[in-house]
Amino acid sequence: ADAYGALVYAVVLPPLRYALTNEWRVHDPAAAVAMLTAWRPLLPDFVFDELTMLQVLPRLESALKDWNAKQLPSPSPPHEWLLPWRPLLPPSGFASLAPSLRHKLAETLLAWMPLDSAASAAARDLTKPWSDVLDAQSWRALLLRAVLPKLQTALDSLVINPAEQDLSPFHAVMHWSELLPTELLAKLLLERFFPKWLLTLQHWLSQQPDFGEVSRWYVGWKGEVGERAPALLSHDGVRDQLNVALDLLNTALGDEEPPPPPPLEEDEPPPPPDDDMEDADDSVLAGSRWAANDDDEDMSLRETLDRLAASHDLIFMSTADRHDGRQIFLFGKVRVLLDPAKHLVYAKLDKRGFAPTSLAQLVKEAQARSG
C-alpha cells in the first residue's frame, strides 16, 4: 500500500495537479469534476485530499471572493460552479465557503425589489439552490438579512381595498413561500398583513354592507393564502386570525352590534409598566433581561425572543391584542409583553396577570403548554 501510494504521488499526482492549476476554469467545472470523479476510486485518501484541499478549495474561495455580486440576474451564479464540487469536497471544506457565500448573496439581494417581478424571479433563482445546502442557521440568517426586510416593505405597500383590490404586493410576497420556513412566513403575515386586513373588515362591517359580498371577500382571501402557502392554514396564529374574521362576520350576521373599528393611529407610546411590575423581585428582573453578547449587539429584543423560540421549536409572533396600550405577543402559547427600553419580558403565567419572567422560565412554561 505504501509503495502504491508513493507511486501515485510521484507519477499520477503531478499531471492532475497541473490540470487543475492550468486547465481548469473555475466557472466551467464540468471537465475538472469529471476528471477527479473518475480518479477518485484509484487515489489514496491523502492524495485526493491534497488535490481537493490545496488545488480546488482555494480557487473556489478566490472565485467566490471575486464574484461580481452587484449584478442581478448574475451571468455566472455561484451555484453553477460551486455545487458540482459538493460531492467531492469534504463537508468541512464546503462548509468553509458558507460565510463568504452568505455575505455575497446578501450583497446581491440588496438591490432587488419584490414588486419588480423580473428582479424578484432572478433573486429567487439565485437563492433557491442554497436552501438545502446551507445549514439551517446560515439559511435563516440570509433570509432575515436580505429577504424578509424586502417582503415587509412589499406588504406595507399593500392597501386592503375591497372595492378595487391590487393583489400584486401580496403575490410578490407569496412567491417566496417555497423558500421561507412556515413560521417566518406566518410571522410576516401576522405582523404586516392581518392587522390591517382585520381593520378593513371591521370598518366594512360597521357600514351595513352586503354580507354576501363580505363573505366572498373573506373566502377569496383565505383561498389566496391556502393556494400559495397551504401550510399556513394549519398554523395556529394564522388560523386564529381567520377565526377572528369569522367571529366578526357571525356577530354582524346575528344582528349584533359589531365591535367598533380600532383607531387608525397606533403610534402612541406604550404606558409605563404596571405597579406590580415595578415591585417585582430583583432576581426575576435580572433573569428576564436580554443577555446580549458580541454577536447580538444589533439585535432587538423581539429578534432575540424570535431566535430563542426557534431554537426550542416554538413560535414567537405578534397578536392583534393589546394590554394597557402595549402589543401582546405569543411565545409558544404564553402571552408576553416586551419592554425594549429595559430589556424586560413580562409573561402571563397565571391569573395574577403579566409579571417579569426569566427567559429560562418562559421557555419552560411554553414547552409545557405545547406538550
Image (spheres, helix red, strand yellow):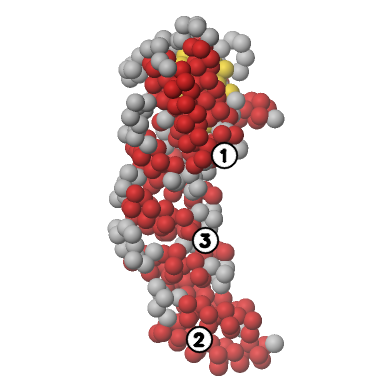
Q: Which residue is mark 3?
A: 95
Is residue 178 or residue 47 the one in the foreground?
178
- Are the residues tagged 2 and 1 within 8 Å (C-beta)? no
Q: Which residue is mark 1?
A: 231
> Residue at left 64%, top 25%?
365
Q: Nearer the viewer, mark 2 or mark 1?
A: 1
| Three-letter code for the amino acid on which mark 2 is drawn | Leu
Is residue 28 or residue 364 the one in the foreground?
28
SS state under label 2: helix
- Are the residues tagged 1 and 3 within 8 Å (C-beta)? no
Q: Earlier in the sequence, mark 2 or mark 1?
A: 2
Q: Earlier in the sequence, mark 1 or mark 3?
A: 3
Q: Is residue 323 visible?
A: yes
> Residue at left 61%, top 18%?
349
Q: CA distance from mark 1 to mark 3?
A: 30 Å
Q: Nearer the viewer, mark 1 or mark 3?
A: 1
